[in-house]
Image: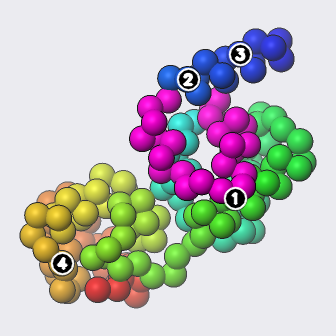
Amino acid sequence: MLRAAILSCLLFAATLPVPAQDKLPDGPGKAVLLKTCKSCHPPETVATKRHTRDEWEKVIEKMIDTGATGTDEEFDRIVDYLARAFPKLDKVNVNQAPAEDLAATLALPYPSAQALVNWRGKNGPYRTLDDLKKVPGVDGAKLDAARDKVLF
C-alpha cells in the first residue's frame, strides 16, 4: 500500500508542468513540500496564500488531520519554508505585486487579481483606488474593505 502511494506521488510529480513548480521559490524545505503535499493539491495552491508562521502551522496541522503523511521533522521543514517563502503581507503595492500577492493580501479571488495585473500591464500604473475599481471583474466592495492594505 505504501509503495503504491509513493509510486502514485512520483508519477503525479512527473506530470506537473514546470511553471507550476516555478511559482515556489527555491530554498530549504521546497523539496519536502513538493514530496509531501502534491499528492493532494497542486503546488501553485500554496503560492496563492500568505500566512504568519502560526497560521502556516495551523494549515499544516489541518493537512495532517486530513491525511498528510510525513515525519515531524518534515512538517517542521515545510512550515519553515512556507513561513519564509510566503509570509503574510500587511500591505501590497498594486503597481508591482504579482497576482498571487494581490489575491492573498486584498482577499480577492485569483482571477480578479490576475485581471488587475493584466490591466496594469496594458494601461500603466494605478494612481487611486478608483482606478482599481474600473477593472472588469474586480469587486469594488472588496477593494474598499482592503483599502488600508493598498500601496501605490
Q: Amino acid at mark 2?
A: Ala
Q: Which residue lies at the image location 19% right of the left edge and 79% below the top edge? A: 126
Q: In this orientation, does residue 18 appear?
A: yes
In this image, 55 relative to 18: left or right?
right
Q: x and y percent of residue 96 in the render?
A: 32, 74
* Residue range of the region highlighted in magenta in the rendering: 16-40
Query: Residue 3 colored magenta?
Result: no
Task: Give the answer, above or below, for where 63 lies relative to 125.
Answer: above
Q: x and y percent of residue 56 in the render?
A: 70, 61
SS for dot 3 = helix
- Which residue does the numbered mark 2 point to in the structure image? 14
Residue 7's disc is: 3
The outermost residue toward the right is 72
Residue 125's disc is: 4
Q: Quadrant of the N terminus?
A: top right
Q: Which residue lies at the image location 76% right of the left edge and 12% below the top edge? A: 4
